[in-house]
Image (tube, grey):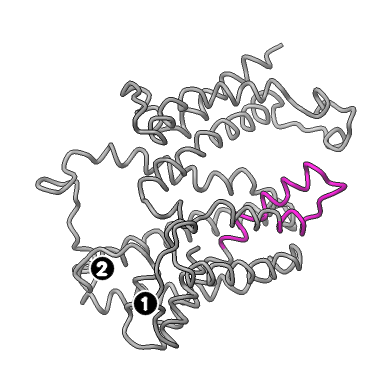
Amino acid sequence: WVGGTSLLTLYEALVGPFSAAPIAFLGGITMPQFSFFMIFWLIQVLVLIKGIESIRIVEKYSAPILIGLSTALLIWAFWRANGIGPMLSATSQFGPGGAKEGQFMKVFLPSVTANVGFWSTLSLNIPDFTRYAKSQKAQLTGQAIGLPVFMALFSFLGVAVTSATTVIFGQVISDPVEVVSRIQGLTPTVLSLIGLMLATISTNIAANVVAPANALVNLAPRKVSFTKGAFITALLGIVTQPWRLLSSTEGYIFTWLIGYSALLGPIAGIIIADYFLVRDRTLDIDALYSTSGSYWYSNGYHFKAFLAMAIGVLPSLPGFINMAIPSVAVPKFFQTLYSCAWFVGFGVSIFAYLALTRE
């Protein structure tokens, strides 16, 4: 959706703005918005049907371009805001006299949980990428440098540029598409939008397509190839209507991100408990590929793991229901648990799994 919006903004910068009314059955977006979303969707599908090698090439060449363009955006914000001081001068809304005075922890805890949940998807499925590493050292180095370092830098860039918009434009603008569309000069705007589209393609394919495509392959390896799995995932991307998810900050963070973090936390806890505590980091490689080995469990399903997952999800369920359906009231205790859903699920599922599998 972000990529489609960037493509539409690029078109309007070059040709001129569209004038179209929102369409109700599309969730309140206009036909041009939907059309450019589908065009961008198709671009990604063309990359996916070429297989994992085409994805590797996209990631390889887009990374240095993104680093360069991101650095340029930070320099632009520094220049327009007249220095790092004014650039970071926006006062906290949580401070004395601020609009959200005294509400820091109320916002901080669910925000941390939402971010952990956001990255938990890729963390759980990182073997989809590390399996192609040449050595254990190579994958350790790649993850240690590529993820924490660059994500910290990109996070700072996002915060710094957003803070600078209060000085440059007189208002806080967190939407990257809107920020780059306001850069003076056609060439900088076009380059920034192209960079944003590259970022969307590389991130979306790596973080949101590879893992579910492989999951679908594992469900039916004789019927579903990686390309088919990727295409099914792409179709699901349309069905979920991402513009609805992003239409509300509260809905996106507090319902969607924290909601699925309540599922991913228990999964992570079970994986950690099983590998480190139950099996003591010892795997039977042959049994992993056998229908009669120790990992086959009950016809391929580990029901104790499913039960441990359900137990891990339960504490966060009342808070999720309250967030999704505000008219359903729940005690404050469950709302607090839900704000830490990933961490609660992670811890509870570890103890539940160990108790269920103890011999």
* Image spot of residue 258 (x, y percent): 45, 39
* Image spot of residue 156 (x, y percent): 36, 60
Q: Which residue is drawn at 22% across and 39% down?
A: 103
Kind of residue sitting beneath label 1: Ser
Q: Which residue is drawn at 90% across and 27% down?
A: 292
> Magenta segment, principal secondary structure?
helix
Query: Which element type, helix, strand or loop, lies under badge 2?
Result: helix
Is 332 magenta? The answer is no
* Image spot of residue 233 (x, y percent): 66, 54
Which stretch appears magenta?
Answer: 203-231
Kind of residue sitting beneath label 2: Ala
Q: Nearer the viewer, residue 44 or 296?
A: 44
Q: Which mark is residue 181?
A: 1
Q: Mark 2 points at which residue?
A: 164
Q: Nearer the viewer, mark 1 or mark 2?
A: 1
Q: Is residue 31 above or below residue 217?
A: below
